[in-house]
Image: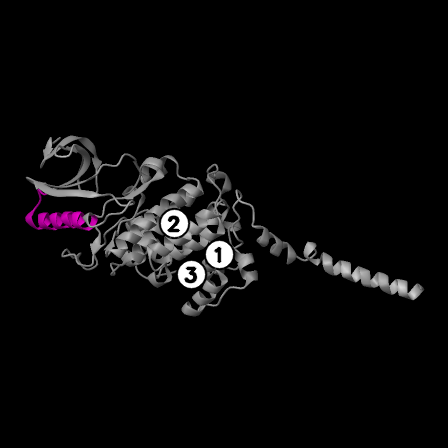
Amino acid sequence: MISQLGRYEVIGELGQGAMGIVYKAKDPLIDRIVAIKTISLNLALEEKEEYEARFYQEAKAAGRLSHPNIVTIYDVGKSGDVAYIAMEFLQGRELRDVLNEEPLLPIDQVLDIVVQVAQGLAYAHEHGIVHRDVKPSNIMVVRDGHVKITDFGIARMASTSVRTQTGMVLGSPKYMSPEQVMGKPIDQRSDIFSLGVMLYEMLTGQVPFNGENVNAIMYQILNAVPSPLSTMNPAVPDMLNFIVAKALAKAPDDRYRDAGEFADDLRACRAAVPRSGAPVDLRRSRLRQADAQLPGAIPMVRHDGAGAEESRPVVTLGLSTVFDSSAATMRLAAMTSSPEEVEEFAKTLKIARPTADALSQAAPPIVNAERPMPAQAHRSSTANTPGKSGNLPLIAILALVLIGLVLAFFY
């Protein structure tokens, strides 16, 4: 193990990163412990230039960002055939390690984590930086559940001088967006898709797109519709079904426009979810496929030409009409906004506003078990229910009229 990197005194090895070894080190100038990410430049000239350029791109991209949910970059340098970045030393664990030990976290904890990731991504996107590799191993959970996004090593900046080759795929296959799989230009909505995949995994214990090899995974991403969350984990509220459905839309235009909107809906859902309960045991709660069809489900069987493997049909549980992206958008708006805002939203996007009956049937409101329903809402709900106390005044009036008629007849 090396003992010195520039002015930094190496204390020990933290692990292997995506591009090289990560060390724990000390900055003697200010007596600060740092993490140092390295990359060996002992490569062929062409490879050396590409790797070094991408390494410094990470430093430049992440170094521009100053946000509570993004790891802080302190310095960048080169020592012999080793380039390095000195960054904030985080005392915590990778989210990947957390999920390996406890695949199904309580829903409120899942939302707390994903909201923070969405906030960090929103900040990066505002500064023209797309992460391109959002996944659990690039998320650190530190003290008190605070979250930090790491590894902007393959981030694309609008002003970058490092251009990826046409059709070159960067990222982790299971978390890639459809446009990333196809090698098309991407923007912040690709990160939203990847975060949607991560959220799906945290809520169900498995990724929505999987396969025996990279080609099979990519085919699933492009063609398969994942099972709705609530069929995998009954504890998931309806609102999360809609949020994830919108984040995982195949077409970028059907997803959230930015991570800030994604975070807003997640916060609204978080406010309606009770504080931590015991994680659901999926082995006992998972429904049989035959019983998991949703009302109004549309059977989904896709055939695409190409090789023998790709030509196999992809059969899913079926996507209910309530999970259509436009419908999900309006239902989310109805759950989180005032009637006036919903009406304006519907006019702007030219989407029909859902009726009260449709909302109650497809997406019943989430009630926080810790907070009672407001008195006004309770009165309105009981007043509109047939046979309930809302009809008592009318019954009393009719009874009095009948008594009067009887008395008039006899007297």
Tell me if mark 2 has few (under 14), some (14-19) or many (20+) residues whose alpha carbon lies within 10 angstroms of its own: many
Residue bearing the label numbered 1: 335
Label 2 secondary element: loop
Where residue 209 appears, as percent x and y from the top left, is: 36, 50
Q: Is residue 159 above or below residue 175?
A: below
Q: Earlier in the sequence, mark 1 or mark 2?
A: 2
Whether residue 313 is visible: no
Q: Which mark is residue 21?
A: none
Kind of residue indicated by mark 2:
Pro
Task: Give yes or no for contact between labels 1 and 2 (Cβ–Cβ under 8 Å).
Answer: no
Residue bearing the label numbered 2: 208
Whether residue 158 is visible: yes
Q: What is the spatial separation of the Cα atoms under label 3 and label 2, in whole angstroms?
A: 17 Å
Nearest the eye: 47 or 242: 242
Tell me if mark 1 has few (under 14), some (14-19) or many (20+) residues whose alpha carbon lies within 10 angstroms of its own: some
Magenta-drawn segment: 41-62
Magenta includes 44? yes
Nearest the eye: 289 or 387: 387
In the rendered image, which quarter is residue 110 located in?
top left
Left or right, 193 with reference to 325: left
Where residue 228 appears, as percent x and y from the top left, is: 45, 52
Where residue 164 appears, as percent x and y from the top left, is: 17, 56
Residue at image point 30% right, 60% down: 306
